[in-house]
Amino acid sequence: MNAGVILLGVFLCLAALLVALFVVFRPRQSKVPRSQLVTIKATGTGDAAAGTLSKATSSATEAINGLLERRGVRYSLGTTLELAGVKARPADFIIWVAAVTALSAVMLTLLELPILAFLALGVVPLLAWAFLKFRTERRQTAFDDQLGDTLQLLSGGMRAGHSMMHAIDAAAADSDAPMSEELARVVNETRLGRDTGESLMATAARMHSEDFSWVAQAIEINREVGGDLAEVLDHVGNTIRDRNQIRRQVNSLSAEGRTSALVLFCLPVVLSTAMALISPSYFAPLFKSPFGLVVLVVSLVLMGLGGLWLRAVVKIKF
């Protein structure tokens, strides 16, 4: 059978499975009033109406949740997804990654690339981890970029006569994500009895934001010694805006280096994948020879080391 036909069929199967997973995991609006949910659950009519696919998905989700609970990593994985801004439960995310990994391995196996299929079992989860890392860093950067405007909202609320918590609540309502989500978390934790300063410091630690830790320390010192908190927040906001301006200039100057590193790292992978899909026999001697396998492993290791080295060169801390 033609390799192109096999590839098309595999891609269609992958698309169908992804659509099915999206339909299963997509949050649905309940059309049944809450007062009737307990009655439906008690009479068992809800179980009778559930489909086979939904039951299987629920069983798999519960099994994964139980495994994560026993391993003690369910909370940490949920926190990682939350920091990355991924609106998914840990079990659902694991099922997504497992499905994409299995389908990638099957596709490469049908294309008669068993070595790449074996590597896909480790590469796809690694790409999922890199995706979470990238989303987390981008969310933290957005949080730092919004901090100057948020301090202006807080100082304006304080000058208008609001208390600190009312000013934070108003800033959470007027800000965009992720700042609105983090400030709303501070408000909710304070309402549940947690100290405001402790909640602010926990937010700074969770978002790895040194600037926000200065804000939390300024608020805590003002609570102890008194003074005009609005003026203090204005001074801190001006300092943070100056730091953000310098950081943007540094990012602009190092953009060329980051782009070069990305091209140098992705070019061999993209070209090798394209050649393997267009002409699978082109890399056959490399995979069938022990020396070729050694060269492949050494190349992957050197590429990884080179990527880490380039990342360290272009990542400037100040």
Image (cartoon, helix red, strand yellow):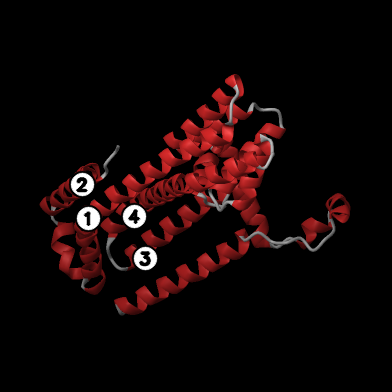
Residue 209 in view in this figure:
no
Q: Local crowd at mark 3 within 10 Å, few (<14), some, or many (≥20)?
A: many
Amino acid at circle 2: Leu
Q: Nearer the viewer, mark 4 or mark 2?
A: 2
* Image position of 87 (left or right of 306): right
For marks 1 and 3, the one nearer the N-term is: 3
For marks 1 and 2, the one nearer the N-term is: 1
For marks 2 and 3, the one nearer the N-term is: 3
Q: CA distance from mark 1 to mark 2?
A: 9 Å
Q: Local crowd at mark 2 within 10 Å, few (<14), some, or many (≥20)?
A: some
**Helix, strand or loop for disc 3:** helix
Q: CA distance from mark 4 to mark 2?
A: 24 Å
Q: Residue furthest left?
A: 291
Q: Which residue is mark 4?
A: 120
Amino acid at circle 1: Phe
Q: Nearer the viewer, mark 4 or mark 1?
A: 1
Q: CA distance from mark 4 to mark 3?
A: 10 Å
Q: Nearer the viewer, mark 2 or mark 3?
A: 2
Q: Which residue is mark 1?
A: 265
Asked if labels 2 and 1 touch by Cβ distance under 8 angstroms, the answer is yes
Amino acid at circle 3: Met
Residue 248 in view in this figure:
yes
Query: In the picture, which quadrant includes the C terminus?
Result: top left
